[in-house]
Image (tube, rainbow, N blue to C red):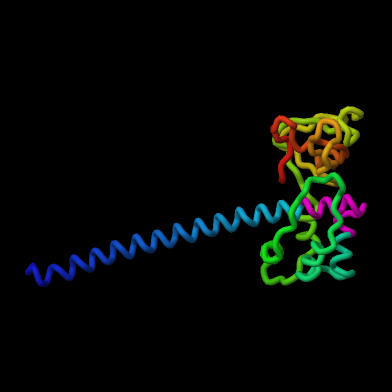
């Protein structure tokens, strides 16, 4: 092949390799953005779960009643009612401090919980975030009271068990650990359990 004919083929090959590298870089960038966004939504969801849980404990309400209030007697909760909840939250005194997420993050979370084609949150979907579920990640105990010193052990909680959070987290007075009142899905037993030890060992995590 003559030099003046060969050079365009060489340049074309170089351009194609650069385009492939550029496409790969863009794909990697999109994956990193999606991963960061998902991680951010996980944090927002965790904050919302804690805020709703504290609100329910402070008002003595339950997830079903809160849904009825936000749905105004209807079958679903719209975005404005969901966002409005975070303007009227009543937080539990002594509960773990939790910052209210930005409104843009709350809107994104609301959209992520909707069923395809829906613009309002059904009761089942709302309860997934209002009716917090925890998983035992390290064996611990279920006890009768918030205060550990005056509690009696109801039974052991085994790794892998799923619990429905009913109240808390609330800081225990003497030892200072965060405690939650829970109901075990396994047998319906209710009591208090520590989220983590004061040494940092974690017992319960979001299911």
Q: Quadrant of the C terminus?
A: top right
Residue 153, located in which quarter of the rendered image? top right
Q: Which contiguous range is marked in magenta? A: 50-65
Q: Is residue 139 above or below residue 88?
A: above
Say left or right for 36 vs 131: left
Instruction: Identify the image quadrant of residue 10.
Output: bottom left
Q: Is residue 94 left or right of residue 204?
A: right
Q: From the top left corner, tell me how far across and down residue 164 is, in percent.
A: 81, 45
Q: Quadrant of the N terminus?
A: bottom left
Residue 186 placement (x, y as % from top left): 81, 39
**Depth order, front residue of 130/91:** 91
Magenta span includes 12: no
Dominant secondary structure of the residues highlighted in magenta in the image: helix
Horizontal side of residue 162 vs 173, given as left or right: left
Residue 52: say if magenta.
Answer: yes
Report the label total: 0
Q: Where in the figure is residue 64, as x and y percent of width and height?
A: 87, 58
**Which residue is rendered at x = 75% and y = 43% of the image?**
134
Give the residue at x 85% y 53%. Answer: 91
Residue at 86% from the left image edge and 35% from the top image edge: 173
Residue 114 in percent (x, y) is at: 70, 65
Q: Nearer the viewer, residue 11 or 207?
A: 11
Residue ID at (11%, 71%): 5
When asked about the image quadrant of residue 73, the answer is bottom right
């Amino acid at each position: 092949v003559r030099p003046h004919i060969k050079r365009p083929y060489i340049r074309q090959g170089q351009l194609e390799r650069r385009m492939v590298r550029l496409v790969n870089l863009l794909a990697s960038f999109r994956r990193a953005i999606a991963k960061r966004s998902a991680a951010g939504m996980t944090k927002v969801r965790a904050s919302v779960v804690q805020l709703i849980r504290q609100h329910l404990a402070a008002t003595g309400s339950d997830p079903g009643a809160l849904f009825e209030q936000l749905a105004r007697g209807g079958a679903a909760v719209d975005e404005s009612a969901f966002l409005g909840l975070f303007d009227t939250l009543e937080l539990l005194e002594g509960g773990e401090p939790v910052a209210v997420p930005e409104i843009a993050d709350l809107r994104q979370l609301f959209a992520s919980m909707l069923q395809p084609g829906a613009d309002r949150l059904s009761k089942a979907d709302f309860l997934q975030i209002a009716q917090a579920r925890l998983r035992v990640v390290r064996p611990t105990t279920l006890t009768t009271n918030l205060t550990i010193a005056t509690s009696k052990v109801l039974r052991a909680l085994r790794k892998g068990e799923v619990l429905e959070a009913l109240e808390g987290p609330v800081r225990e007075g003497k030892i200072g650990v965060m405690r939650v009142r829970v109901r075990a899905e396994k047998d319906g037993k209710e009591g208090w359990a520590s989220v983590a030890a004061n040494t940092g060992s974690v017992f319960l995590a979001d299911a």
